[in-house]
């Protein structure tokens, strides 16, 4: 419970920071932090804690930016399930794979937001190809830095066949 | 350790993880239709959760919530120019409501809210209260907007308590004046109570060729699946070409009939005649009338009293009370959307956020002492507006299309006009934009901005709400008396 609360506060601040950066730096250079959370969840692969984490970020985004809680929660779950089949490859040291995944998810986020939230008039955040590339670069970088502070893929017990 | 379905040995945590992944997949599938078709719909409890987000983001804002609404300071006084502009708007609006009815001066009333379907409301609740005896006396009184017939005052239901009445005396004695529009189709429950659709005798004449033959007809509300809102039950002559360029449009006006509509004066506009049939063979299959008003966009209407010398005993409220709110957080002005978190007690969803005489936006969610506000041009939000250019006014129902960048680099609020469908935005360049009526918490006559560019049904408005908001704002509390 305490862990969920701490994550909630951190993710709310992260959503606020993202919007502040978009305003200060411009949407072209700010990575999509929801993609960072999704890829980090794939690396950690602790699916029992994913739902509260996604829900926290979804409600923060719905409060500070366009889109409802349901929309953002659905988007993160859908994106997670799009990439989950490749989750065996999500290790902190396999950064090219993470970069490609982050780039693809950022592009998917922009396109789906454009279609569903802005009636096809473009990403409401104003992100474009450059922002997707920045996301692809920043996300593995963050995970490498995170691994220095103890963020690693958790040991998963492999199933063993019974005799 | 335990065995899983396929006889595989798994740890307890691995089993829980598998279950969690299944829950995630099912939840994702269940949310798909809601996210794809209603991406902006908020859940009933979402306001409270968003309040917790606001608190986690700005913990010290709880102080603002505690004192919200208790400070005596309101927003700064509007300047003289704003006040003069709003006064001029009200005058032109009333002139519009009086146009073409010199013989019978209507008793003007402000619309408080609409009832019925969201897309097609057919009952207007006026901002006027009267005793039940008085309402019974007023029943059947025609209600007009300009020279357009809007509907008729309805009698209070004998077995239903009045809505909005708070004290026991009010429940027994008073209710709002309600108007049923001419396109109202009685529900099954109303039919069982003996309420039937209103039939109106009308005469349609060509606007372009006064000598063209007239069309006499009997009109009633059309079915919801019909292409237009009124349908012609009987017409004489049955076949008459009304769509050729020489004669179109045909405009239907009320005719005098002592038997069907003794209180209704002749000459009120019902709408334009619309035909469905074979154009090449000049054969009409069915004939309809499309009214020129949309109930969602009406602000002021007039009651055509049978005896104008004896004014009705109606209690009219002057202005809805307002609450005070302070800005907790505002999204940056440079972003392509605008979100503002307010510390505001008793704010309600849909209420107008006001700064003096200006409308900045409306409340999107509220709960727990916090409220979130968005500008009027929020994507896909429908809003009634009134355009005022000189002495001309035009009520419209607009759909927000977000914030667009103009050629000069300035941000503009973009709207698409849904009603009237034929409005040319270019003809309204420079018009001031005011609020219409959209519920009790969204009063009319607030200044929204100025129309800077119009092109067809698309208009770009320089909105006050997309500039930086002041620290202290007000919000309408229409439900309070």
Image: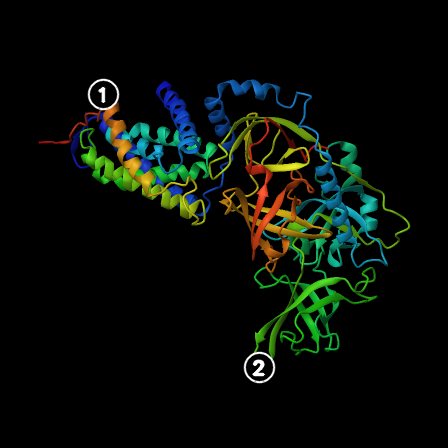
What chain does mark 1 sit on?
A
**Rendered-image quadrant of the N terminus of chain B:** top left
Residue B469 placement (x, y as % from top left): 57, 31
**Residue at figure coordinates x 28%, y 32% from the top left:** A139
Same chain for marks 1 and 2? no
10 Å neighbourhood of mark 2: few (<14), some, or many (≥20)? few
Q: Which callout, 1 or 2, points to the residue nearer the camera?
A: 1
Q: Which mark is residue A15?
A: none
**Residue at figure coordinates x 27%, y 27% from the top left:** A142
What chain does mark 2 sit on?
B
Residue B267 placement (x, y as % from top left): 78, 64
**Rendered-image quadrant of the C terminus of chain B:** top right
Report the number of discs: 2
Front residue of this view, candidates B256 and B377: B377
Residue B15 seen in render: no
Regarding mark 2 in the picture, which secondary structure is present there? loop
- Mark pair 1, 2: CA separation: 82 Å
User: Mark 1–mark 2 contact, CB under 8 Å?
Assistant: no
Residue B36 placement (x, y as % from top left): 41, 46
Q: Is residue B231 above or below residue B360?
A: below
10 Å neighbourhood of mark 1: few (<14), some, or many (≥20)? few
Q: Which mark is residue B281?
A: 2
Residue B309 placement (x, y as % from top left): 91, 50
**Residue at figure coordinates x 8%, y 31% from the top left:** A163
Regarding mark 1 in the picture, which secondary structure is present there? helix
Front residue of this view, candidates B5 and B391: B391
Q: Which mark is residue A148?
A: 1
Q: Point out the residue furthest to the front here.
A: B408
């Amino acid at each position: 419970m305490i862990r969920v609360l701490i994550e909630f506060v951190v993710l709310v601040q992260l959503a606020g920071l993202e919007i502040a950066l978009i305003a200060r730096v411009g949407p072209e250079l700010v990575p999509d932090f929801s993609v960072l959370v999704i890829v980090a969840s794939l690396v950690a692969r602790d699916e029992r804690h994913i739902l509260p984490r996604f829900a926290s970020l979804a409600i923060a985004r719905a409060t500070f930016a366009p889109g409802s809680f349901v929309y953002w929660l659905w988007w993160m779950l859908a994106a997670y399930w799009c990439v989950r089949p490749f989750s065996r490859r999500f290790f902190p040291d396999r950064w090219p794979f993470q970069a490609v995944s982050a780039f693809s998810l950022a592009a998917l986020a922009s396109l789906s937001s454009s279609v569903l939230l802005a009636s096809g008039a473009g990403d409401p955040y104003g992100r474009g190809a450059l922002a997707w590339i920045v996301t692809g670069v920043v996300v593995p970088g963050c995970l490498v830095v995170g691994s220095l502070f103890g963020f690693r893929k958790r040991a998963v017990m492999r199933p063993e066949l019974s005799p | 350790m335990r065995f899983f379905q396929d006889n595989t040995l798994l740890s307890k945590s691995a089993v829980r993880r598998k279950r969690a992944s299944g829950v995630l997949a099912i939840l994702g599938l269940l949310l798909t239709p809601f996210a794809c078709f209603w991406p902006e719909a908020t859940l009933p409890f979402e306001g409270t959760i968003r309040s917790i987000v606001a608190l986690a983001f700005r913990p010290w804002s709880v102080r603002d919530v505690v004192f919200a609404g208790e400070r005596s300071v309101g927003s700064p006084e509007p300047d003289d120019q704003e006040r003069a502009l709003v006064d001029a708007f009200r005058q032109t609006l009333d002139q519009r409501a009086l146009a073409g009815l010199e013989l019978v001066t209507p008793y003007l009333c402000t619309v408080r809210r609409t009832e019925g379907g969201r897309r097609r409301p057919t009952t207007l609740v006026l901002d006027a209260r009267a005793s039940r005896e008085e309402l019974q006396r007023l029943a059947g009184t025609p209600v007009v907007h300009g020279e357009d017939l809007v509907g008729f005052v309805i009698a209070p239901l004998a077995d239903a308590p009045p809505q909005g009445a708070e004290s026991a005396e009010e429940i027994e004695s008073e209710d709002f004046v309600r108007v049923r529009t001419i396109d109202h189709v009685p529900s099954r429950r109303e039919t069982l109570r003996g309420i039937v659709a209103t039939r109106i005798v009308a005469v349609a004449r060509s606007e372009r060729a006064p000598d063209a033959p007239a069309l006499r007809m009997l009109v009633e509300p059309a079915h919801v699946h019909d292409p237009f809102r009124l349908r012609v039950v009987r017409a004489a002559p049955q076949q008459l070409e009304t769509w050729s360029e020489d004669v179109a449009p045909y405009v239907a006006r009320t005719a005098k009939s002592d038997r069907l509509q003794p209180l209704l004066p002749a000459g009120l506009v019902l709408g334009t005649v619309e035909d469905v049939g074979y154009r090449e063979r000049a054969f009409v299959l069915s004939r309809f009338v499309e009214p020129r008003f949309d109930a969602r966009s009406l602000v002021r209407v007039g009651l055509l009293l049978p005896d104008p010398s004896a004014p009705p005993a109606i209690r009219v409220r002057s202005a809805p009370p307002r609450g005070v709110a302070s800005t907790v957080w505002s999204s940056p002005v440079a972003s392509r959307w605008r979100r503002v978190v307010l510390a505001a007690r008793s704010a309600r969803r849909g209420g107008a956020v006001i700064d003096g005489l200006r409308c900045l936006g409306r409340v999107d969610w509220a709960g727990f002492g916090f409220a979130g506000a968005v500008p009027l041009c929020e994507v896909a939000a429908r809003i009634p507006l009134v355009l005022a250019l000189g002495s001309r006014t035009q009520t419209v129902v607009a759909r927000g299309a977000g914030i667009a960048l103009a050629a000069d680099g300035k941000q503009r609020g973009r709207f698409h006009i849904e009603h009237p469908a034929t409005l040319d935005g270019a003809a309204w360049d420079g018009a001031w934009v005011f609020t219409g009526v959209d519920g009790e918490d969204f009063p009319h006559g607030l200044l929204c901005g100025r129309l800077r560019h119009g092109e067809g049904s698309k208009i770009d408005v320089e909105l006050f709400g997309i500039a930086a908001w002041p620290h202290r704002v007000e919000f309408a509390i229409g439900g309070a008396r």
